[in-house]
């Protein structure tokens, strides 16, 4: 018997990973909202994972995320307007700017990390600690060896 298109799509690894990531992020955002964190949506996670203490150019975020610089710039502007990010001149090239996490952004990230750990524990309980650990290890190996 032939599988339906939606059945094939719903069991495709890429689609499952995408749906799982969105579900995970939505759960974290719900917890953050209950903590009073506002102004951050699922789409802002195109930018947030790429910003670190060294700062990063918007063009580099766009390259790594695989989206247009215009889309990244709009998201950065929204996060700056809500005080989660800061823009500073690039000391290596005064014509360019770097994106940094602000103090409010650091507080947000600390809460997000705490909620992330709690959701991971909940998921591990659902599927079993060993299976969850195996899944994370397999994903880490794939990500580290991605050619």
Image: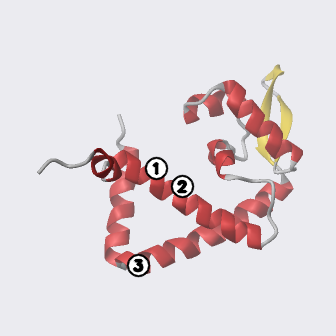
**Residue found 67% across the figure and 63% down from its top:** 29
Residue occupying image coordinates x 87% and y 50%: 83
For the C terminus, the quadrant is top left
Question: Residue 113: x percent and y percent?
Answer: 64, 66
Q: Residues within 10 Å of mark 2 (few under 14, many from 20)?
A: some
The mark total stands at: 3
Mark 1–mark 3 distance (CA, rounded to whole Å)? 19 Å
- The answer to whether marks 1 and 2 mark residues whose Cβ atoms lie closer than 8 Å is yes
**Residue on which disc 2 sits:** 22
Tell me, yes or no, whether the two marked residues, 3 and 2, touch with CB atoms within 8 Å. Answer: no
Q: Is residue 47 above or below residue 30?
A: above
Q: Residue at x 45, y 74 (%)?
A: 123
Q: Residue 8 appears at what percent x and percent y?
A: 27, 48
Disc 3/disc 2 C-alpha distance (Å): 18 Å
Q: What residue is shown with label 1? A: 18
Residue 137 showing in the rendered view:
yes
The reply to whether discs 1 and 3 touch (Cβ–Cβ < 8 Å) is no
Viewer-side residue, 8 vs 95: 8
Residue at figure coordinates x 73%, y 47% from the top left? 53
Q: Secondary structure at mark 1?
A: helix
| Label 2: which secondary element | helix
* Disc 1/disc 2 C-alpha distance (Å): 6 Å
**Residue under label 3:** 126
Name the residue nearer the viewer: 143 or 27. Answer: 27
Say few, some or many: other residues with alpha carbon within 10 Å of mark 1 (under 14 / 14 to 19 / 20 or more): few
What x and y, as percent, mark residue 130? Answer: 32, 76
């Amino acid at each position: 018997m032939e599988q339906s298109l939606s059945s094939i799509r719903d069991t495709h690894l890429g689609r499952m990973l995408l749906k799982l990531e969105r579900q995970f992020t939505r759960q974290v955002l719900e917890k953050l909202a209950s903590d009073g964190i506002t102004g951050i949506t699922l789409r802002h996670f195109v930018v947030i994972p790429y910003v670190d203490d060294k700062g990063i150019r918007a063009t580099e975020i766009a390259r790594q995320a695989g989206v247009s610089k215009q889309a990244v710039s709009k998201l950065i502007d929204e996060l700056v307007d809500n005080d989660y990010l800061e823009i500073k001149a690039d000391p290596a090239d005064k014509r360019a700017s770097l994106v940094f996490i602000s103090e409010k952004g650091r507080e947000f990230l600390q809460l997000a990390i705490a909620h992330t750990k709690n959701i991971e524990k909940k998921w591990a309980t659902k599927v079993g600690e060993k299976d969850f650990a195996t899944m994370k290890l397999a994903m880490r190996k794939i990500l580290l060896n991605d050619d």
